[in-house]
Image: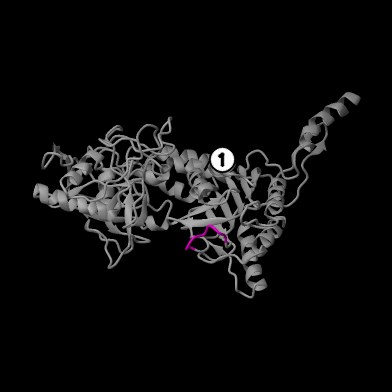
């Protein structure tokens, strides 16, 4: 029987070589990014690199695929982030730990490379954006930053991040506050907590906040954007890796209740059918996941669509009986004026319940007919305003050429100066579109995530990740297919100013297509995303904000006028 012992040993050897908590087949992917910078020439952070190594070791022991870097310059930071992003999968469990200096600028957080200074900074969104797109089942971003440093300028501490589905963000100090010198209580408490077998991340973060408040006598308050969804445990309860049973090597089943159910695939399956009206697809889901997260809703829909196949999906707004059609051919009111498309009257469901709180709630809006620019205002059109004395500011084209490219580096007030000149020249009342008019126009009768459908399709827009060849700048207007209304570049290319003041939700938004305005508002809404944004910003419901009197090289606009 010597041959049998040799066979069993051969089977066990590769299994026993695995880490104690290696990911088992069928479990969600576990991915981590650890960045630890301490060797700043002007403001070193003692112990940051050692702490980063301890975090990385703990995460690896918990079965995470860890991308780790320390004392990294800007190129090394971006390489690490790209490597991390390439490992992300839908439904993954994710941890990001950053220890180093950070600053806030232009309403964003920037991580400072070991070079120090803003020239070596990396936008935090370079980590957040691919994470959002991947849609993890549960994720934590811990920014052990916000210390006083020579580069912080007039702004202190870190800017808060909006609540994001499935993603929690932890700061060691409240937004706008700086971390006292040498105070690593939050990081130390967190590392201790995540080493506790079986401890949920939400409970670990509670321990961190309690520890920081207690040890600083509440002079320092750790800040958390939202609790992470259940299921994120760094150090699982120990279990044997392999045992010999007869002549076979056997992996014991997980001991954690519910661990055998693959939540990631459950969610992915549901996302692929959740807007379907086909009863057979809901039956297929129930066959695969009879006790799944969405089983009850799937049974309800299956019964409803078997009885009435034409019924709309539950909780999904029914489309109008017929998609509205743009009226007539494009027109111009004067030589050199932007080309206009007549947008028909209609009603639609505005917003999204899928991602951000400021895109909620989905609500009905009625739109009167109006005209909207077929394309974004171009440099050629803007330069005519300069030549005729209507516009005073000449934006830089950054060496890329002017002509048919959309004019950018335009703030909200600049756009309105152009519209005033255009109104006087044409004798027509030009204005910026309202936010609801803009969303109605980009949807053009659709209720999907993007103007062209439910998922990203390559070569339909100019953005980061939208094209096989990265462009990195705006391209001449009209190079990508128009939507059903005949409007070009509503998604991507230049981000577009609209008339509305920024609001954190739609609960007070007008339902009649007018603009939301409040006295003295400094922040205005931008729509459509730009060449410098990822596909998250190109969703039909996506919205973001910028200060009305601040220019940025991605921001432009298109014109509107009443009929």
Q: Which residue is drawn at 26% across and 50% down?
A: 393
- How would you rate the neighbour count of disc 1 (Cα within 10 Å): few for under 14, some for 14-19, many for 20 or more? few
Instruction: Say left or right for 192 vs 366.
Output: right
Query: Which residue does the numbered mark 1 point to in the structure image?
Result: 75
Instruction: Say left or right for 186 vs 547.
Output: right
Q: Can residue 289 be seen in this snapshot?
A: no
Q: Residue at x 54, y 52 (%)?
A: 117
Q: Is residue 150 magenta?
A: yes
Provide residue 411's location: percent of width, then percent of height. Answer: 30, 53
Residue interval drawn in magenta: 149-155
Farthest residue to the bottom: give it: 217
The quarter of the picture where the N terminus appears is top right
User: Which residue is at the front of the view, 12 or 86?
Assistant: 86
Provide residue 277's location: percent of width, then percent of height. Answer: 37, 41
Provide residue 516's location: percent of width, then percent of height. Answer: 27, 61
Query: Dividing the picture into quarters, in which one does residue 224 lie?
Result: bottom right
Query: For numbered disc 1, what is the local secondary structure?
Result: helix
Tell me which secondary structure the magenta stretch mostly adopts.
loop
């Amino acid at each position: 029987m010597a041959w049998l012992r040799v066979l069993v040993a051969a089977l066990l050897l590769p299994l026993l070589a695995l880490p104690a908590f290696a990911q088992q087949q069928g479990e969600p992917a576990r991915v981590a990014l650890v960045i630890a910078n301490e060797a700043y020439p002007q403001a070193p952070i003692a112990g940051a690199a050692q702490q980063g190594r301890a975090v990385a070791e703990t995460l690896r022991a918990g079965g995470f695929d860890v991308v780790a870097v320390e004392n990294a310059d800007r190129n090394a930071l971006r390489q690490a982030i790209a490597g991390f992003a390439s490992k992300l999968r839908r439904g993954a469990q994710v941890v990001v730990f950053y220890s180093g200096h950070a600053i806030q600028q232009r309403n964003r957080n920037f991580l400072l490379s070991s070079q120090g200074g803003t020239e070596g900074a990396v936008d935090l969104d370079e980590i957040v954006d691919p994470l959002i797109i991947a849609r993890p089942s549960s994720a934590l971003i811990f920014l052990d930053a916000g210390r006083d440093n020579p580069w912080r300028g007039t702004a202190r501490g870190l800017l808060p991040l909006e609540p994001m589905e499935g993603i929690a963000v932890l700061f060691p100090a409240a937004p706008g506050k700086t971390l006292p010198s040498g105070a690593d209580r939050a990081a130390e408490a967190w590392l201790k907590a995540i080493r506790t077998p079986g401890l949920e991340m939400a409970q670990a973060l509670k321990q961190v906040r309690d520890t920081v408040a207690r040890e600083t006598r509440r002079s320092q308050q750790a800040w958390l954007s939202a609790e992470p969804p259940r299921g994120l445990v760094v150090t699982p309860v120990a279990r044997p890796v392999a045992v010999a049973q007869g002549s076979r090597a056997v992996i014991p089943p997980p001991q954690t209740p519910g661990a055998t159910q693959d939540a990631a695939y459950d969610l992915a399956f549901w996302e692929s059918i959740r807007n379907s009206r086909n009863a057979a697809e809901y039956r297929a889901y129930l066959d695969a996941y009879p006790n799944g997260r969405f089983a009850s809703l799937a049974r309800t829909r299956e019964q409803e669509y078997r009885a009435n196949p034409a019924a709309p999906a539950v909780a999904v707004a029914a489309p109008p009986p017929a998609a509205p059609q743009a009226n007539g051919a494009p027109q111009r009111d004067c030589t050199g004026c932007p080309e206009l498309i007549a947008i028909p009257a209609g009603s639609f469901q505005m917003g999204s319940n899928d991602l951000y709180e400021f895109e909620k709630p989905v609500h009905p809006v009625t739109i009167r007919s109006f005209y909207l620019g077929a394309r974004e205002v171009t440099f050629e059109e803007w330069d005519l305003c300069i030549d005729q004395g209507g516009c005073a500011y000449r934006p830089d084209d950054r060496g890329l050429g002017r002509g048919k490219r959309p004019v950018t580096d335009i703030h909200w007030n600049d756009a309105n100066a152009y519209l005033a000149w255009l109104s006087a020249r044409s004798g027509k009342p030009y204005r910026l579109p309202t936010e609801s008019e803009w969303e109605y126009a980009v949807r053009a009768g659709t209720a999907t995530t993007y103007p062209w459908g439910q998922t990203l399709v390559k070569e339909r827009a100019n953005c980061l990740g939208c094209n096989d060849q990265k462009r990195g700048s705006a391209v001449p207007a009209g190079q990508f297919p128009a939507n059903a209304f005949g409007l070009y570049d509503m998604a991507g290319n230049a981000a577009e100013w609209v008339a509305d003041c920024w609001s954190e939700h739609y609960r007070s938004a007008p339902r009649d297509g007018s603009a939301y305005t409040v006295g003295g508002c400094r922040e205005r809404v931008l729509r459509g995303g730009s060449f410098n944004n990822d596909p998250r910003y190109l969703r039909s419901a996506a919205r973001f904000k910028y200060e009305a009197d601040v220019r940025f090289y991605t921001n432009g606009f298109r014109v509107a006028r009443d009929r």
